[in-house]
Amino acid sequence: MAGFADLNLPQGPDKKSLQSLLEAAAHLGYSAVALNHVIDFKEKKQEIVKPVSPSELFPSLPIVQGTSKRIKVLTRLTLVVSDPSHCNLLRSTSANVRLYDIIAVFPKTEKLFHIACTTLDVDLVCINVTEKLPFYFRRPPVNMAIDRGIYFELLYTPAIKDSTMRRYTISNAISLMQICKGKNIVISSAAERPLELRGPYDVANLGLLFGLSESEAKAAVSTNCRATMLHGETRKSACGVVYTVKKPRKVEEEETTLPACKKAKTQA
Amino acid sequence: MRTLRSRLMKEVCGGASPIGWAQRPSGSGATAAMVRFKNRYVLCEVVSEDPRCRQCIEDRAVGLAVRDAIGRVHGDYGLACCSISFTVKYLNAYTGTVLLRCRKDSYRLLCSALPFVRQLESRNLRYPCFLNTLHVGGTIRTCQKFLIQYNRRQLLMLLQNCTNEEERQCIQKSLLSCSLTEEQSQSGDEEDDDGTETD
């Protein structure tokens, strides 16, 4: 059974508040969290810094409630793209981008959504929950994303804070459900304070509000998160796969041919 | 300790009903052929940053906060559905444990509205907090069994963080003595022996 994970905790500059967030998450039962670093290209050109390793930030990680293991902390990068030229950053082989565990993209237009689902090398596509979607989802890019193993992320903290956000969240989520039939969904918080976090059982109940079935909602907090983390790991490690097969060698060949180093010495 | 606990429960559950945890068929119990009403009991924990919030945990405050959240999320229909058999059955201010009851048909409405509880209000004081759902059961007994296991785990974690030898002995004693007793007058639920909160 996969542990529960919350893949979006905004990384603020304050270390103490992050520590209290981690403790709250561990108390609620999350086995893994991801610290999110958001890059917005509308502002001045920002440099993508190397991710700070969690072991440097937090000397001691709290223990997850219900198990005896420590909470796992990953690093995550979110790119808010509103222009196709912003995507070049992902295609370039910049070393810093590769160092993050999970990469997410937040498309603002329909064309960018299509590009993100079909060609970009990301793990998560964020769905806007704070305003009415400017575009409708279409089936072909969503199905391609599901085939590629890309997950769609929904946030729930705006829904808790404000009533108009709640309406946008639910309407956007339900329109996504109608297209993707509840597959490949990840629900996460964007909690800045420990009071905005909710336990995994409650988040699964929120998934019911969004139109998911009970098993899908539970998977949205546990199995799909684990699949996203694995997807990020494979992206980090493997660029290609070499498949070796043992070929049976004939015995006579071995005796006649000498290894190359020995050959050179005898001839000289 | 036991009398304090039973007094707490008496105040909370209402003076009329007996203190025991014995499950009896709820509902009007009109005729012998009537099937009993099925309820769902939702066990939650009130989590907050402010330690003064613990004093504010009362059955009326929590009931109001939950009803308000249901009204905001599901509207008048949801509020009406959920309030058919809605009460706060058990409350423990020291650990922040709350047991809510509702009808089986409308427990989904209740559970999906619980994440939207943001604050508790009583005596014109507001404290920001949230409810963490621990367990949903069909009877009080299953929730009680779960609560005992959960509290035992909490005590174990407290034991690890213990600094004082006296506190350590206290916790070890209560760990060994927690169990589900069959007696009517006392509940088997144990509480923290040291009243200090470590988190």
Image (cartoon, rainbow, N blue to C red):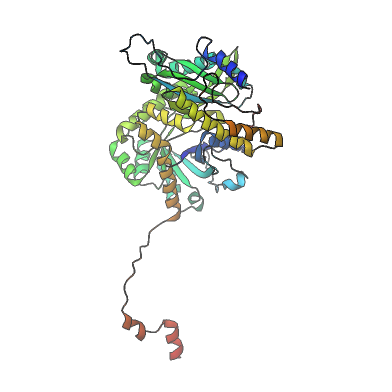
Q: Nearer the viewer, residue B146 or B57?
A: B146
Location of the C terminus of chain B (image quadrant): top right
Q: Residue at x 36, y 39 (%)?
A: A184
Location of the N terminus of chain B (image quadrant): top right
Q: Residue at x 56, y 14 (%)?
A: B10
Q: So how many labels did they put on this image?
A: 0
Left or right, residue B142 beside residue A59: left
The furthest residue to the left: A140
- Say if B164 sits above or below B186 in the image: below
Q: Nearer the viewer, residue B165 or A163?
A: B165
- Say if B166 sits above or below B124 in the image: below
Q: Nearer the viewer, residue A86 or A119?
A: A119
Q: Position of residue A13 (x, y in %)?
A: 60, 38
Q: Position of residue B5 (x, y in %)?
A: 59, 20
Q: Is residue A258 among the parts visible in the rendering?
A: yes
Left or right, residue A8 beside residue A137: right
Q: Position of residue B104 (x, y in %)?
A: 37, 20
The furthest residue to the front: B183
- Say if A110 sits above or below B118 in the image: below
Q: Nearer the viewer, residue B22 or A112?
A: B22
Q: Residue at x 47, y 15 (%)?
A: B87
